[in-house]
Amino acid sequence: MPLRTERVRPLAALLPIIAVSLLAACSGDYPQTTFRPVTEFGAVINDLFAGVFWWTMLVLAVVWTVLLYVVMRYRRRPGQTPPRQTHGNAVAEILWTLGPALIVAFIAVPTIRTVFYTYREPSPDALVVDAIGHQWWWEFRYPELGVVTANQFVLPVGREVHIRLSSADVLHNFWIPRIGGKRYNYPVPVQSNVPPTKVNALTFTINEPGEYSGQCAEFCGTSHAIMRKRLLAVSPAEFDAWVERMREPAQQAAAPPAAEQTAQAGEGEAAASAQPAAAPAMASAATPAPGSLEAQGRDIFLRSTCVACHSIAGTPARGTLGPNLTGFGSRWAVGAGARPNTLENVIAWITNPQDLKPGALMPGTRTPAPNGFPATGLSDEEVRAVAAYLLSLK
Ligand code: CUA
């Protein structure tokens, strides 16, 4: 009996390890996996990884098989004399030099091919987006479309995208794992006249609609861990509709509040111009219904120091130091991923951003920003109205 227990014990010790390995496969959703790429860019990198992985598994199998054979075949036996000793073998030495050289070549050729592929020139009709890192949030500019947004951005599937990476302050790193790639945002100004070779960039085509999350991948200060971003990949038609909503809506600011909804329901300008009598049930992007909490919030926002740093398309707010708030209500989070985008959290954010995100360069209602920008002085009622207004911006 004791002998048997001794034999079973090591196996029993292995059980938890095996169980953990198996349970690890009972995955939930891994939104930031690199193993399910949704671009050809991510696919070539994943294929390279898988290829190298299986080559190394083959090498491992060969080495372990030979090792086990040698260990068993030539193990020490009772009464055995020492075997014949060999010193120097030209054939063996050539083989164990050639073998690794071939393995390195097998890995190097596809690797270099992939490196060049991921740095290829974008096609002339690629959609250009500037992704600019800030402490601690992301700015996205679409220079050809006149759209600026922050932390959450939208791209069409099936069209090549060229993302130019830069930073407004320190080194950041752009990473959306399911897109593939992970590249530095260097503190260089991104302008259309900068040669493409001088700017870090990612060129890819998304082949699957969905929401893809990512985050800054280079330590960049206090709230580096709260520098998240989200990409919505949508059909080209949905992308065009989003651009229309986000674009400087000059006509919208002049039009009655419900112009946007009616224009979408009807067919374009004829419907929009025919609807002034329609009662605005919902607030449009830039102009909420008169008398509503959102309208109060809009007035408070526009007359407070908010406009020193923030922009909202269709309003006089033109600040560029902080995130552009156009379409804020559609974002998944407040504070670049600090909290889900709910009324309570937006109120908490405006009241004291430091509670949600240490070091955030935004003042609270009673506390100045870390860089000395004075407190906004808004009352609790004013904060609630501003939060309601911001969340109405879809
Ligand atoms: Cu930006 Cu880390």
Image (cartoon, rainbow, N blue to C red):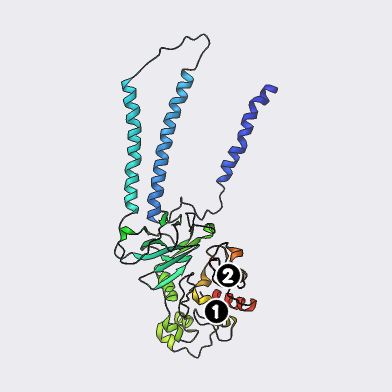
- What's the amino acid at mark 1? Ser
How many numbered discs sit on the rendered protein? 2
- What's the amino acid at mark 2? Pro
| Residue situated in front as seen by the camera: 43 or 326 | 326
Instruction: Name the front one of labels 2 and 1.
Output: 2
Expressed as whole percent of the image width and height from the top left, the position of residue 143 reads 37, 70
Residue 368, numbered label: 2
Determine whether label 2 and label 1 are within 8 Å by CB: no
What is the quadrant of residue 22 in the picture? top right
Q: Secondary structure at mark 2?
A: loop
Residue with the most extreme right position? 1
Expressed as whole percent of the image width and height from the top left, the position of residue 249 reads 43, 80
| Residue situated in front as seen by the camera: 156 or 330 | 330
Residue 304, numbered label: 1
Expressed as whole percent of the image width and height from the top left, the position of residue 198 reads 32, 58
Compared with 209, 102 (above or below) is above
Query: Does residue 71 show up?
Result: yes
Compared with 247, 183 (above or below) is above
Q: Residue at x 41, y 12 (%)?
A: 84
| Residue situated in front as seen by the camera: 208 or 188 | 188
Q: Residue at x 49, y 52 (%)?
A: 33
What is the quadrant of residue 186 in the picture? bottom left
